[in-house]
Amino acid sequence: MLTRLVTHLMNREKQYLDEAAKIAMKSSMRHKHGCVARYGKSVVASGYNHERNAGLNEVWSLHAEAEVLKGLRRVYKDDKQKIQKCKVYVVRISNDTDIYKMSKPCEICKRRLEEMGIREIYYSDIRP
Ligand SMILES: [Zn+2]
């Protein structure tokens, strides 16, 4: 599994990060994450992190990657061959701007994506 900083990305792939950043803006959380999965040239799944009330005054944060996993499952069911060709992009933006921040996927999301068949994940660091 490749997990890389976006600084390794070629310019023509930057559009997918911008797309993830746009989606991150929808998040109402303090740390806004957006995530997209692409197959070929199209974005096939996307998501942003949000709060989920777990009852008993507990609030969980549902990670952007989890939404993307759900989307991939919906689109491809168990078609691992297609899923293996998808690339995943994760971006965190700072509040009210589109400046990128560190968005390294947590171990749980990373493992879930890997189990799903995803081989490449790109995540943002701080844009110079
Ligand atoms: Zn996570």
Image (cartoon, rainbow, N blue to C red):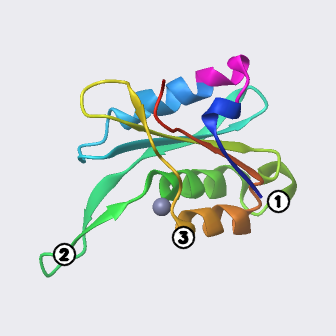
Of callouts 3 and 1, the N-terminal one = 1
Q: Amino acid at mark 3?
A: Ile
Read off the residue under disc 3.
108
Give 73 or 92, whichever is nearer the viewer: 92
> At label 2, which amino acid type do we have?
Glu
Q: Which residue is mark 1?
A: 80
Separation (CA) of disc 2 from disc 1:
35 Å
**Side (left or right) of 60 relative to 2:** left
Circle 3 SS class: helix
Query: Dividing the picture into quarters, in which one does residue 57 lie?
Result: bottom left
Say if 107 sits above or below 39 in the image.
Answer: below
Q: Position of residue 28 (x, y in %)?
A: 23, 43
Dots 2, 1 in contact, CB < 8 A: no
Position of residue 31 in the picture relative to residue 122 (left or right): left
Point out residue 59 in the picture as x, y percentages from the top left corner.
Answer: 21, 69
Label whose residue precedes the other's in the sequence (2 or 3)? 2
Is 105 above or below relative to 47? below
Residue 58's label in the rendered image is 2
Dot 3 beta carbon under 8 Å from ligand 1: yes
What is the x, y in percent for residue 118?
A: 74, 55
Query: Cα distance, mark 3 to mark 1?
Result: 19 Å
Say left or right for 66 vs 112. Answer: left
Q: Is residue 62 left or right of residue 5?
A: left
- Marks 2 and 3 in Cβ contact (< 8 Å): no
Query: Which residue is at the far right?
Result: 81
Q: Residue at x 55, y 63 (%)?
A: 109
Q: Residues within 10 Å of mark 3 (few under 14, many from 20)?
A: few
**Residue at (60, 21) in percent of width and height:** 15
Highlighted magenta segment, given as a residue range:
9-15
> Does mark 2 have its CB less than 8 Å from ligand 1?
no
